[in-house]
Image: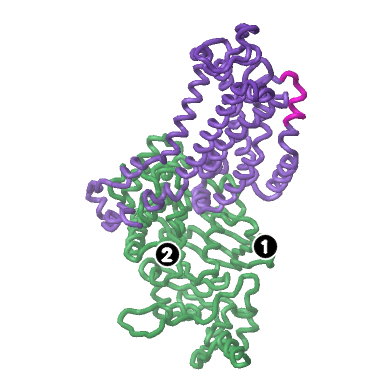
Chain colours: A green, B purple
Amino acid sequence: MADVLLEIANLHTFFYGDAGVSHAVDGVTFSVRSGETIGLVGESGSGKSVTALSILRLVRPPGRIEPGSRMLFEGRDLVALPERELRAIRGARIAMVFQEPMTALNPVFTVGEQIAEVVRIHSKASRREAWQRAVEMLQIVGIPAPAQRAKEYPHQMSGGMRQRVVIAMALVMNPALVIADEPTTALDVTIQAQILELLQQLQGRFGTSILLITHDLGVVAETVSRVLVMYGGEIVEEAPVRTLFADAHHPYTEGLLAAMPKLGEHRDRLRTIPGTVPPPTSWPTGCRFHDRCPYAWERCALEHPPLYQIGDRHVSRCHLAEEPERRQHPHEPLVVQRAAQAGSKA
Amino acid sequence: MPLLTHASAPADALGPLASASGRPAPSDPSVTARKRRRWPSALWWSLALITLLCSIALLAPALAPYAPNEQLDIIRLKSQPPSLAHPLGTDQYSRDLLSRMLFGARISLSVAMIAVCLSATIGTAYGLLAGYIGGVVDAVMMRVLDAFLAIPRVLLLIALLAMWSPVPLPMLIVIIGCTGWFEVSRLVRAEVLAVKQRDYILAARALGAPNARLLGRHVLPNILNPVLVAAALGVGNVIILEAGLSYLGVGAHAPTASWGSIFFDGSEAFQSTWWIALFPGLAIVMTVLAFNAFGTALRDTLDPHQLAGGSTRR
């Protein structure tokens, strides 16, 4: 097996707001191997984006990475690294692709200048060399006539083109890891597929590891080898992608899979998971998913489940691992029952 | 009407393989559209007027028929109304008003423009730092600013300028400049707070840009437009301010001519020698108008929506 590139252990990122402490990321542990693509999946508010920002320590106050968190990257602990050394890693060894290509580019510079800037920050290249690198990179990410397009401003480009530019900026220093935070969410469906394909191509070419963050399991299925499912600031299930689709264990993952519309299947209504992600200032006691879970029983409200080993490289944070027979008796989740009670009283 | 926007869309749809074959891009109409983007007419005429005023000021020694402070004939040419020999008349000391006006333009315009540049620079630097650093530093810097803003500017100026008598011109410029940056820095700080939250700032940080670079290359250029507009509008204000200070006896001093000092010389005897006050008054009004029109037109031109949308927004 390839060696481990990034090892995150016990990552806690809290936000100290007026409404209390928000436990946005609450004990996340996972690792990324060289050349691997892994997916980080969850609803809005599950803590995936904060996890991504934490890796590069880009979380702004009042957010803070708690002591005790560890992020080993190429043998160095990112949590303890001085800001100066961290800057040398950002963009050069670990790069990020953001969700909104509309806003992730500076409107007052040409795209070529912006790619060249990354080169100039991280190497002693001359202006001319950096510019040539930029044009070359635009060619690699599939922008036709790159020498001309490099002189254009972001507002002159379409969303798909801009996302290619953002990817070019991320890859120009040939980083070991690219964190792609919902890279296709803001794009048209046809462009989405192209961007994913591009990411895969580039990974094959450069051997980059990719941490793909998304709420879209469809995206994950086509692209990644391993999936982490996040809920309530924790990882609730981790499995190779085939295992996850064939044999999901955690009821939350089940819910996400069921919410995906399937080809050829007729439904009058799309299925959803009832309720919403609770606010990170007050996660429910016990299992954080228990009030939305169709199998939850008393134990779930009392005892916080650990990550149970389900199979080969497959773990799940659900007590069903110990009491699998409970899966035979689904019921209305607590949130639905409560809503019904409130309704009958009124 | 969002038609004709992204000329790149069809090229985009070709996917990554298109570039591998080295196909030339279809010529991009948005490039030429950008070059052809028309400036509003107000920008043209105000800029033309400002250029005219500046060249008059620069060429004053060549254009003026007499020396500005020369008393031609205190008996016969005192307080002459406009005539062919003296197109704008003469003042009570028999000095040629046209010559004084031309040289006065140098003082009025240079004081106003240099002082405004100074305030804009100080204000931008102060606002940038406060907004970017944030937290306690920001709070302290802003309270200091509040304290400055609590003092009426004219009183502050009189107090400071009264230390010299007469005031050397460079000192006048420095003092006007150093008392005019408070509003600019508030404006800049507010802009910085907004720009700081933009994704491209986060993206630049994620790519390893150090703070100085973030400030200079990513924040500053994106907050400059409102500063330019405020500066253009500020020139008009300072011209009026300088005129007022001259009237109060703490601005440009006799016999040096500035539009303000000539105007207030003439205003004492407006009913008998109306021309002495009228022409500098008109010059001030025209200049202020030109700079205000320029500032407003500049704001409309630099509006990011018009930049981004090309012809889509009106």
Q: In which quarter of the image is residue B248?
A: top right
**Picture disc at residue A156:** none
CA distance for labels 1 and 2: 29 Å
B95 to the left or right of A112: right
Image height of A274 relative to A56, above or below:
below
Q: Where is residue A195 in the image (x, y as percent from the top left)?
A: 35, 60
Q: Mark 1: few, some, or many residues within 10 Å (few <14, many ≥20)?
A: some
Disc 2 packing (10 Å; few <14; some 14–19; many ≥20): some
Say what amino acid the circle numbered 2 marks.
Answer: Thr
Chain where mark 2 sits: A
Residue A316 seen from this side: yes
How many marks the image carries: the answer is 2
In this view, B251 is above or below A259: above
User: Image quadrant of residue B251?
Assistant: top right
Q: In this view, does A91 lie to the left or right of A319?
A: left
Instruction: Pick whichever of labels 1 and 2 is earlier in the sequence.
Output: 1
Q: Residue A16 carries which label?
A: 1
Q: Which of B9 and B57 is in front in this view?
A: B57
* SS at badge 2: loop
Q: Nearer the viewer, residue B39 or A33?
A: B39
Secondary structure state at the residue bearing disc 1? strand
Residues tagged 1 and 2 counted as in contact (Cβ below 8 A): no
- Is B89 covered by the magenta stretch? no
Residue B133's spot in the image, x, y percent? 64, 46
Camera-nearest residue between B79 and B59: B79
Q: Where does label 2 land, which residue?
A: A185
Is label 1 on the same chain as label 2? yes
Label 1 chain ID: A
Span highlighted in magenta in the image? B157-166
Q: Is residue A252 left or right of residue A22?
A: left
Name the foreground residue: B308 vs B43: B43
Residue B47 placement, left or right of A132: right
